[in-house]
């Protein structure tokens, strides 16, 4: 499994393992802070919700102050999607030393920083694009690409209702939204697939990657901010993720900006675009 390989890599490469210091669960994102100042993020799945049961709260409290790798192991193999999100954020925090440009370049990766490279900038006008996860890039892509198809676990959450002189219509009007379990056949008709890193949280990324074989695949989002080899060896062409550059500001944003927090991410993080050299 991808996350298993990410943890194994950290166990082999981390010489001084930091302690888990703080967990912040925002309506849309989870942040994990380590006692060495490193921080990781993960997107929360709408289907899983962000309500923390008393049992989970007690369990998470036991992880505070614990060796980060031990806590990552304790959080593994859960059926609780929110717990998965916390584990992914923790893995990303632990991975920060290996997401530096010098380190990645020395291990055969090409790195660019800044911008929104994963969206319209990487797509040609004659391309058809499949997107796993309805994110903010859908509108821009739909204005440029020949066709855009978006798969979601709960498509109805992303549809609009239009009432005008023509009667009643259903949106979006620029993209098609389909049920996730129907996506495989659509993906084989697409030129490029944009795959949200949130599929790591739902434990569906490996299944989706199998459906994307032969297509160009771009994994995007802050949930996939760990050493990229487990992704690229499975057919991912480009990884577009975010690295936290101001952990204290990011913590403050997560605590105080509720569901609007993502619009402030550029103030506390930077995009990384990674591919094989």
Image (cartoon, rainbow, N blue to C red):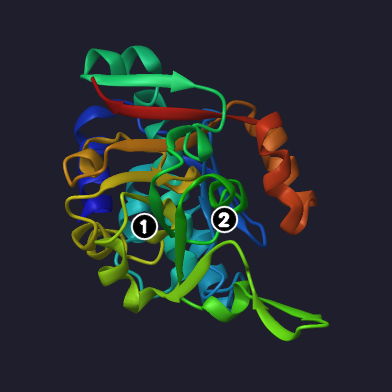
Tell me residue 25's x, y (percent).
Answer: 62, 58
The tag earlier along the polypeptide, 1 or 2, is 2
**Relative to 271, does residue 143 appear above or below in the rendering?**
below
104 or 158: nearer the viewer: 158
Callout 2: SS: loop
Q: Residue at left 42%, top 29%?
A: 273
Res. 11 image quadrant: top left
Tell me residue 211's x, y (percent).
Answer: 22, 63
Query: Which mark identifies residue 257?
Result: none
Res. 108 image quadrant: top left
Image quadrant holding the C terminus, namely: top left
Callout 1: SS: helix
Tell me residue 159's x, y (percent).
Answer: 63, 75
**Relative to 187, does residue 95 appear above or below in the rendering?**
above
Tell me residue 138's x, y (percent).
Answer: 56, 54
Q: Residue at left 38%, top 26%?
A: 99
Q: Residue at left 61%, top 72%?
A: 158
- Which tag is nearer the camera, tag 1 or tag 2? 2
Query: Which mark identifies residue 135?
Result: 2
Say which residue label 1 marks.
Answer: 200
Q: Residue furthest bottom?
A: 167
Q: Residues within 10 Å of mark 2 (few under 14, many from 20)?
A: few
Q: Is residue 66 visible?
A: no
Image quadrant holding the N terminus, namely: bottom left
């Amino acid at each position: 499994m991808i996350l298993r390989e990410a943890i194994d890599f950290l166990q082999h490469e981390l010489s001084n393992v930091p302690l888990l210091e703080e967990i912040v669960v925002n309506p849309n994102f989870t942040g994990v802070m380590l006692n060495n100042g490193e921080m990781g993020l993960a997107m929360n799945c709408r289907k899983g919700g962000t309500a923390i049961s008393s049992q989970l709260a007690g369990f998470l409290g036991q992880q505070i102050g614990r060796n980060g790798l031990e806590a990552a192991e304790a959080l593994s193999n859960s059926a609780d999607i929110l717990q998965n999100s916390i584990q992914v954020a923790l893995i990303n925090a632990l991975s920060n030393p290996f997401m530096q440009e010098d380190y990645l370049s020395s291990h055969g990766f090409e790195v660019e920083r800044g911008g929104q490279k994963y969206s319209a900038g990487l797509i040609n006008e004659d391309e058809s694009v499949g997107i796993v996860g309805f994110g903010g890039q859908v509108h821009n892509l739909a204005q440029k690409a020949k066709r855009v198809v978006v798969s979601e676990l709960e498509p109805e959450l992303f549809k609009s209702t239009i009432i005008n002189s023509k009667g009643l219509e259903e949106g979006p009007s620029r993209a098609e939204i389909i049920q996730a379990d129907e996506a495989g056949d659509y993906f084989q008709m697409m030129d490029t697939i944009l795959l949200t890193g949130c599929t790591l949280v739902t434990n569906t990324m490996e299944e989706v990657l199998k459906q994307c074989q032969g297509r160009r695949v771009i994994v995007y989002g802050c949930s996939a901010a760990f050493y990229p080899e487990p992704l690229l060896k499975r057919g991912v062409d480009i990884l577009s993720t975010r690295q936290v550059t101001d952990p204290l500001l990011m913590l403050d944003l997560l605590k105080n900006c509720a569901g609007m927090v993502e619009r402030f991410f550029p103030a506390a993080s930077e995009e990384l675009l990674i591919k094989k050299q």
